[in-house]
Image (cartoon, rainbow, N blue to C red):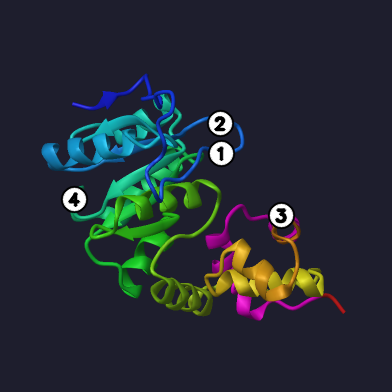
Amino acid sequence: MAKQTASKRRSKPGEQEAPGTESKDSTGVPLRVAVASGPALYREVLCQALDAESSVEVSCRASPEDDIGQLLVQTRSQVLLFDYEALGPNGEGLIARLRRRSPGTRILVLAARSGPETVERVLRAGASGLVGKDSRLATLVRALRSVAAGEVWANRRATAQALEHLAEVSNRGAASNGHLTEREAEIARWVGRGLRNKEIAARLSIDEKTVKTHLNNVFRKLRIGSRIELALQGVRELRPKP
């Protein structure tokens, strides 16, 4: 049975966060994370570990028998941690259905393998990233917060290769995208290579907030809503306006 969690552990006075623990967002509200996994004991241990983090609230716990999509809508979960191997042979199909059912929930895949082929499959299905099952808890928390903020999370090399291939095989093209400015097109290409906003800002010697502004303009002009969709537009072919 799925379990919804209504309360959140609070730090005691004088208690310090463990090293590597992510802080809450600017609103001070913990990230609402749904966990969908197969083995009950594994799911329970994972949920307990996440719920002990001050920046995370486990909003629901789902098994393969549960209606995960309905739970995401009911609990208004911001991120779904999706156990790739435990939830059936058609993982990509389930990811795609969950994205349609709860478009406001980003999906982070938890998988034993994190190579380019797996990364490409889950990104194509609509997930926002993939984290290996051998990762440390602090890494998992960072990954959850990153995808919640609209970033793509996966092994750097695997992500770059997957996004490059997705861009190459995309049949959407970019012939109608000549209205981007030179800086917008440049940032779009760096996104397509798997770089995060902070890294793009460092490369271009500009403020991270400026990168976000340009990226929002790119999304608006191309009528897309995510970095993955930008990769699917064929970002390597984007051209700035004359």
| Residue type highlighted by circle 1 | Asp
Label 1 crowd bin: few (<14), some (14–19), many (20+), radius 10 Å = few
Our reading of the magenta stretch's main secondary structure is helix
| Residue type highlighted by circle 2 | Gly
Q: Secondary structure at mark 4?
A: loop
**Label 3: which residue?**
216
Q: Secondary structure at mark 2?
A: loop
**Label 4: which residue?**
88
Q: Where residue 37 sits in the image (x, y, percent)?
A: 22, 43
Give the CA distance from mark 4 to mark 3: 36 Å
Q: Where residue 187 sits in the image (x, y, percent)?
A: 69, 70
Quadrant where the C terminus is found in the figure: bottom right
What residue is drawn where x is 75% and y is 55%?
213
Quadrant of the image occupied by residue 109: bottom left
Q: Secondary structure at mark 3?
A: helix
Q: Where residue 193 sits in the image (x, y, percent)?
A: 54, 75
**Label 2: which residue?**
28
The residue furthest front is 14
Give the CA distance from mark 2 to mark 1: 5 Å
Which is more foreground, mark 4 or mark 1?
Answer: 1
Magenta range: 213-240
| Residue type highlighted by circle 4 | Gly
Say whether disc 1 or disc 3 marks the residue closer to the N-terminus: 1
